[in-house]
Amino acid sequence: METISTLVGIGIVIYICYKLYNGFYVAPESQISNPQNNSLNTLANPVDAESQYDLATLYYKKQQYKDAKYWFEQSAYKGDKDAQYQLGNLYLQGLGVQNDLKKAFYWYEKASLQEHAQSQHNLGLFYMQGEVVERNKDKALFWFRKAAENGYEPSKQIISTFG
């Protein structure tokens, strides 16, 4: 009898470890629409920008952009450059938010100051196109060079063509 209870106990431990390693509890769709009241949200540590970014990414992959925006924002305000970049993308593309190029520029600039190469490239594009900021080839090339220094290949190609 003792052997059976030991095996059952081991089985329970293995099952719990399997669930922790391989998957998250996915809440019913009715719970996911409110980012404040959602079981997935328990995965995000309220002070840990990385776990908030990871949760935002889960929502983004599920195309739940409003929830993704909420968690990217939480992480971005803590200084996470990847979350800042993703917020810029959401505002640029109008995913889960009103399309807003000024806000996109704002978040790309925050991430760029932390050496985020794709954000630096996007700032270069903003300056080259002159949409939100005044068109300025020198500033565009400055940001393309910064992105190229950080290994971003499309910026390297632009520099080889224009500058």
Image (spheres, rainbow, N blue to C red):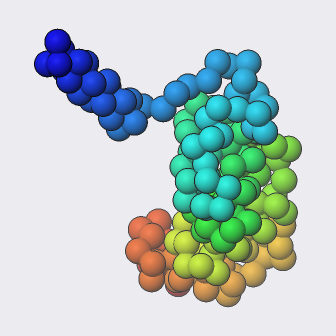
- In which quadrant will I find the N terminus? top left
Q: Residue at x 70, y 74 (%)?
A: 110
Measuring 27% from the left and 29% from the top, which residue is drawn there? 14
Residue found at the very far front of the displayed protein: 1
Residue at the far left in the pictured view: 3
Residue 106 location, x and y as percent?
Answer: 78, 68
Q: Residue 9 vs residue 105: left or right?
A: left
Q: Classify 104 as above or below 111.
A: above
118 relative to 13, above or below = below
Query: Is 48 on the left-hand or right-hand side of 19?
Result: right
Give the side of residue 157 with respect to residue 66, left or right.
Answer: left
Image coords of residue 53 (percent x, y): 59, 53
User: Which quadrant would residue 59 be assigned to in this image?
Assistant: top right
* 7 in relation to 140, above or below: above
The image quarter containing residue 20 is top left
Image spot of residue 4 (x, y percent): 18, 14
Viewer-nearest residue: 14 or 39: 14
In terms of depth relative to the viewer, which is nearer, 13 or 83?
13
Report the number of discs: 0
Do we see residue 3 in this rendering? yes
Q: Is residue 108 visible?
A: no
**Residue found 82% across the figure and 61% down from its top:** 103
Residue 80, horizontal then vertical, whole percent: 61, 67
Q: Residue at x 75, y 47 (%)?
A: 70
